[in-house]
Image: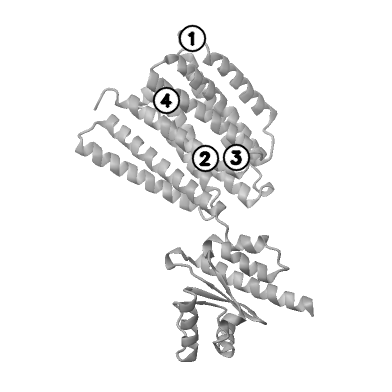
């Protein structure tokens, strides 16, 4: 193993942490930077970015003066976490906690700019005690919260914070005790990447605690196996295996963060059929139906009116669509006139789905949705749109009587 391998690995981990933090910052900004809780979160993210930027620049340039930047950011970590915790719990921390964290922040901000020859090694031990105690205090506030005063979503968010602190505390401590523990690198970047992943997954309701913990367990298992195999094949020692494990786990976490962020952005930006129903002026049924033509999921949908159906038996169509208001090309129907009518409609409009819109006058919606683009959710949304269109049409008809 190269002598400078730990330095390059530290640089890699710092850059990976910055990437994760930037992605998370983008997600939060998209949700609304003016929100008070988001502002608290963004402050903590930017402080953490400053810390890892200082580490990365120090690794690249070798300038020890950049360590001051890292220490200043480190001094702000406990108060950043406390500010976020207060926002999540919607409660002020006790005065003694604020005094402890505020006084410690001021003290260690001053110590950060003093020459190392004056204050080391006591400064490092002090930073270790201050950061760990600050994170423990925030963790204690999380555990001791009144869960009944928070909503289910708020409790879920607080639990994710507690889960990230559970890993952040020992890895922060390991950064300061790396020589005593015999570690070749600082590992806190991995905890920060996990925090980013947990925070992004909060926006995806289906990503529950069990799913996140299961995903983390998979990452740990893959990391251990990859590190063991590579170390065995390359005849690496313990330090080499740790370096490989850190590199692999950081890469997997960055991929998971970017993947979840892109999935979340896609979910938030997609104009679902449900949004179309929620936003449209329901007084105009015809406009509601025509609006579907511009929807990304069913772009090109065609409103089929009675004139376009003149060559077909309306009684047969009415019987078919009364029983099944949403029909797919793949649906099995009775043979004879029923099958002939449907085959003609699907072929004529190059459609995969036909929706019954109104019976007075008789109207259908024909749309094409490839099988690869469909999902149980999309099918359910189509059924909801059909029902809404039919109800709007009936409501409009009654209104004119």
- Identify residue for label 4: 56
Name the spot of residue 266 as percent of width and height, x first. 51, 52
Instruction: Estimate how packed mark 3 is, as few (under 14), some (14 to 19) or many (20 or more) residues with alpha carbons within 10 Å.
Output: many
Nearest to viewer (mark 1 / mark 4): 4
How far apart are the alpha carbons under marks 4 and 3? 32 Å
Instruction: Estimate how packed mark 2 is, as few (under 14), some (14 to 19) or many (20 or more) residues with alpha carbons within 10 Å.
Output: many
Q: Are the residues at dot 1 and dot 2 in contact (C-beta closer than 8 Å)?
A: no
Q: Are the residues at dot 1 and dot 4 in contact (C-beta closer than 8 Å)?
A: no
Which of 228 and 371 lies nearest the eye of the viewer?
371
**Please, which colouring scheme is shown?**
one colour
Q: Counting residues from the N terminus, which is met first, the one under dot 1 or under dot 4?
A: 4
Instruction: Estimate how packed mark 1 is, as few (under 14), some (14 to 19) or many (20 or more) residues with alpha carbons within 10 Å.
Output: few
Return the residue found at the far right: 401
Q: Counting residues from the N terminus, which is met first, the one under dot 2 or under dot 4?
A: 2
Identified at 48% across, 9% down, the residue is 115
Q: Which mark is residue 24?
A: 2
Q: Counting residues from the N terminus, which is met first, the one under dot 4 or under dot 3?
A: 4
Q: Counting residues from the N terminus, which is met first, the one under dot 1 or under dot 2?
A: 2
Nearest to viewer (mark 4 / mark 3): 4
Nearest to viewer (mark 1 / mark 3): 1
Q: Are the residues at dot 4 and dot 3 in contact (C-beta closer than 8 Å)?
A: no
Q: Which mark is residue 115?
A: 1
- Identify residue for label 3: 142
Element marked by disc 1: loop
Q: Counting residues from the N terminus, which is met first, the one under dot 3 or under dot 2?
A: 2
Within the image, what quadrant is residue 226 found in?
top left
Say which quadrant the C terminus sits in: bottom right
Above or below 37: residue 122: above
Identified at 60% across, 28% down, the residue is 79
């Amino acid at each position: 193993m190269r002598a400078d391998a730990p330095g390059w690995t530290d640089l890699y981990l710092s850059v990976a942490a910055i990437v994760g933090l930037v992605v998370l910052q983008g997600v939060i900004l998209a949700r609304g930077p003016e929100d008070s809780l988001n502002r608290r979160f963004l402050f903590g993210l930017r402080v953490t970015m400053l810390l890892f930027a200082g580490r990365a620049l120090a690794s690249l340039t070798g300038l020890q003066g950049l360590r001051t930047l890292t220490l200043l950011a480190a001094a702000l970590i406990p108060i950043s976490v406390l500010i976020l915790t207060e926002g999540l719990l919607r409660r002020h921390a006790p005065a003694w906690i604020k005094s402890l964290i505020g006084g410690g922040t001021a003290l260690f901000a001053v110590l950060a700019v003093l020459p190392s020859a004056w204050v080391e090694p006591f400064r490092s031990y002090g930073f270790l005690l201050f950061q760990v105690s600050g994170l423990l205090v925030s963790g204690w506030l999380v555990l001791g919260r009144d869960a009944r005063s928070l909503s289910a979503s708020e409790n879920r968010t607080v639990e994710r914070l507690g889960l990230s602190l559970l890993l952040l505390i020992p890895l922060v401590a390991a950064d300061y005790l790396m020589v005593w523990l015999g570690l070749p690198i600082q590992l806190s970047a991995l905890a920060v990447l996990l925090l980013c992943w947990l925070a992004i997954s909060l926006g995806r309701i289906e990503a529950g605690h069990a799913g996140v913990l299961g995903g983390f367990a998979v990452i740990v298992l893959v990391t251990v196996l990859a590190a063991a195999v590579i170390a065995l094949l390359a005849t690496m020692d313990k330090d080499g295996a740790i370096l490989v494990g850190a590199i692999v786990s950081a890469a997997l976490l960055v991929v998971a963060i970017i993947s979840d962020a892109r999935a979340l952005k896609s979910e938030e930006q997609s104009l679902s059929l449900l949004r179309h129903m929620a936003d449209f002026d329901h007084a105009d049924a015809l406009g509601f139906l025509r609006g579907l033509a511009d929807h990304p999921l069913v772009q090109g949908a065609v409103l089929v009116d009675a004139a376009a159906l003149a060559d077909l038996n309306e009684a047969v169509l009415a019987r078919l669509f009364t029983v099944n208001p949403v029909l797919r090309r793949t649906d099995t129907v009775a043979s004879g006139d029923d099958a002939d009518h449907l085959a003609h409609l699907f072929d004529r409009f190059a459609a995969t789905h036909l929706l019954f819109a109104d019976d007075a006058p008789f109207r259908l919606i024909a749309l094409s949705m490839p099988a690869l683009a469909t999902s149980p959710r999309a099918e359910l949304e189509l059924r909801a749109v059909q029902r809404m269109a039919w109800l709007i049409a009936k409501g409009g008809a009654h209104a004119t009587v």
